[in-house]
Image (spheres, coloured by chain):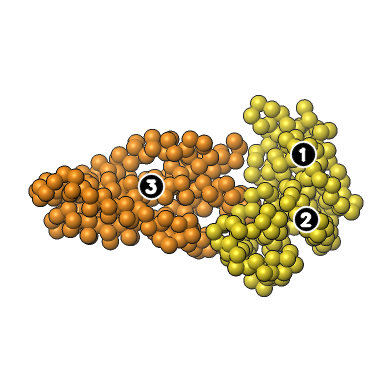
């Protein structure tokens, strides 16, 4: 099977520090990868390199499908009611309002549609960002600390969503220092690639 | 897609928009026009001679008042990252932002120039030159605002640098735009329009590069 996302011999330098080198990975449809490691080791940098937002110091990334990114910055306008903030992205992504409402419902945000984003709690914002992620319908998911701020039910929901996404032929890379249950996922310790 | 981006940017920047304080440039502009005669005294010929220049300086400052709201919030919130993941070039996002910024202050400013001209006792002919000059120059002022906002968005002491960058960038437009008042042959206006065009053409690329550079830092 052809890889959806492949990275070869990646090295990442931030300032004067070489964070990791010689890192390769390849993901086919349905596969998932858990990027693990302590804070500051380069998990976020790896995700951003894979998303094409950061240039690798060495190596190359090849991606055959559209990617969706979920990180600490949710890109939802703080002053705007939640449904309008999400509508901006869903209209850009071409997913319908009905679909977005279903996602909001699923993520437990149904009653928050009229609440400005800045009044939402950390966990609610994370759930809103997950709704944006679902609305994008991209085959490759890049998730940077998706469990931060979520309660137990939220954590389980994320695990379920990732499972469904993989069952539908998507791939997923999760960078997290927390344990996350992913069936048959490869585990990538960045510590193995530090210089 | 461009329409959707423009709609969002306009909603954020327009008077009564969600990032607030969007009427401030207009009020600031009128306040300068109102206070200037009090400051220099009731000398009608002097006011009529210098009033056009005052309107220009007020317009320039009004254009850069919303500087900190133009780029920095979206950079912090990761909006440009999400757009990039979706294949929207930073240059396009900036070009749209520039248009939205122009729409948010220039038409109102042109309207406000009428009462301002009355307050300063400008003659019909001068007012015409000022309005034409502003029409030619405000796109350039909008471009300067977006460019400076993008260059300083990721810096801690951005505000100080913004002031320093503003002076050299805005001097050419002011020289020719306000200079047209002294030489009513249209040459100054044409030069102001040309500089405006150049700034509008360069800004998306320069500001786009600035946003990409901010990611690497």
Residue positioned 18% across, 48% down in the render: B38
Residue positioned 74% across, 40% down in the render: A43
Q: Residue furthest right?
A: A184
Q: Residues within 10 Å of mark 3 (few under 14, many from 20)?
A: many
Label 1 to label 2: alpha-carbon separation: 36 Å
The reply to whether the C-beta atoms of the residues labelled 3 and 1 are less than 8 Å apart is no
Q: Regarding mark 1 in the picture, which secondary structure is present there?
A: strand
> Front-most of A31 and A103?
A103
Q: Regarding mark 2 in the picture, which secondary structure is present there?
A: loop
Residue at numbered disc 3: B64
Residue positioned 75% across, 32% down in the render: A20
**Residue B45 point in image, percent of width and height:** 9, 48
In the image, the chain rendered in yellow is A
Q: Residues within 10 Å of mark 1 (few under 14, many from 20)?
A: some
User: Is A101 left, or right, of B33 in this rendering?
Assistant: right
Residue at numbered disc 1: A8
Of label 1 and label 2, which has the lower sequence position? 1
Q: For residue A97, say whether it is visible.
A: yes
Chain B takes which shade in the image? orange
Label 2 to label 3: alpha-carbon separation: 43 Å
What is the quadrant of the C terminus of chain A in the image? top right
Q: Residue furthest bottom?
A: A98
Tell me which corner region of the image, top left, top right, bottom left or bottom right, holds residue A16. top right
Q: For residue A103, say whether it is visible.
A: no
């Amino acid at each position: 099977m052809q890889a959806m996302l492949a990275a070869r011999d990646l090295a990442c330098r931030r300032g004067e520090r070489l964070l990791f080198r010689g890192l390769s990975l390849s993901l086919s449809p349905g596969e998932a990868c858990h990027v693990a490691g302590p804070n500051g080791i380069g998990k976020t940098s790896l995700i951003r390199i894979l998303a094409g937002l950061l240039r690798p110091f060495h190596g190359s990334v090849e991606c055959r499908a559209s990617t969706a990114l979920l990180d600490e910055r949710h890109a939802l306008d703080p002053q705007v009611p939640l449904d309008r903030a999400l509508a901006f992205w869903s209209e850009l992504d071409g997913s319908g309002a009905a679909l977005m409402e279903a996602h909001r419902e699923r993520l437990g945000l149904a009653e928050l549609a009229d609440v400005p984003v800045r009044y939402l709690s950390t966990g609610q914002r994370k759930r809103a960002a997950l709704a944006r992620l679902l609305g994008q319908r991209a085959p490759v998911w890049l998730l940077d600390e998706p469990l931060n701020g979520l309660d137990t039910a939220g954590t389980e929901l994320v695990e379920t969503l990732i499972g469904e996404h993989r069952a539908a032929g998507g791939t997923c890379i999760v960078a997290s220092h927390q344990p996350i249950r992913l069936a048959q996922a490869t585990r990538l310790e960045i510590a193995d690639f530090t210089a | 897609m461009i329409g959707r981006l423009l709609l969002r940017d306009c909603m954020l920047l327009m008077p009564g928009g969600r990032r607030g304080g969007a009427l401030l440039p207009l009020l600031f502009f009128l306040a300068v026009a109102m206070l200037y005669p009090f400051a220099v005294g009731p000398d009608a010929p002097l006011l009529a001679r210098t009033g056009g220049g005052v309107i220009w300086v007020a317009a320039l400052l009004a254009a850069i008042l919303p500087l900190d709201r133009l780029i920095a919030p979206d950079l912090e919130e990761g909006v440009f990252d999400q757009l990039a993941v979706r294949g929207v070039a930073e240059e396009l996002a900036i070009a749209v932002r520039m248009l939205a910024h122009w729409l948010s202050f220039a038409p109102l400013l042109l309207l406000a120039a009428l009462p301002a001209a009355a307050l300063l006792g400008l003659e019909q002919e001068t007012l015409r030159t000022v309005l034409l000059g502003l029409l030619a120059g405000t796109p350039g002022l909008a471009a300067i605002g977006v460019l400076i906002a993008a260059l300083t968005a990721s810096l801690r002491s951005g505000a100080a640098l913004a002031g320093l960058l503003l002076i050299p960038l805005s001097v050419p437009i002011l020289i020719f735009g306000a200079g047209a008042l002294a030489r009513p042959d249209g040459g100054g206006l044409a030069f102001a329009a040309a500089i405006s065009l150049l700034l509008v053409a360069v800004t998306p690329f320069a500001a786009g590069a600035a946003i990409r550079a901010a990611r690497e830092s």
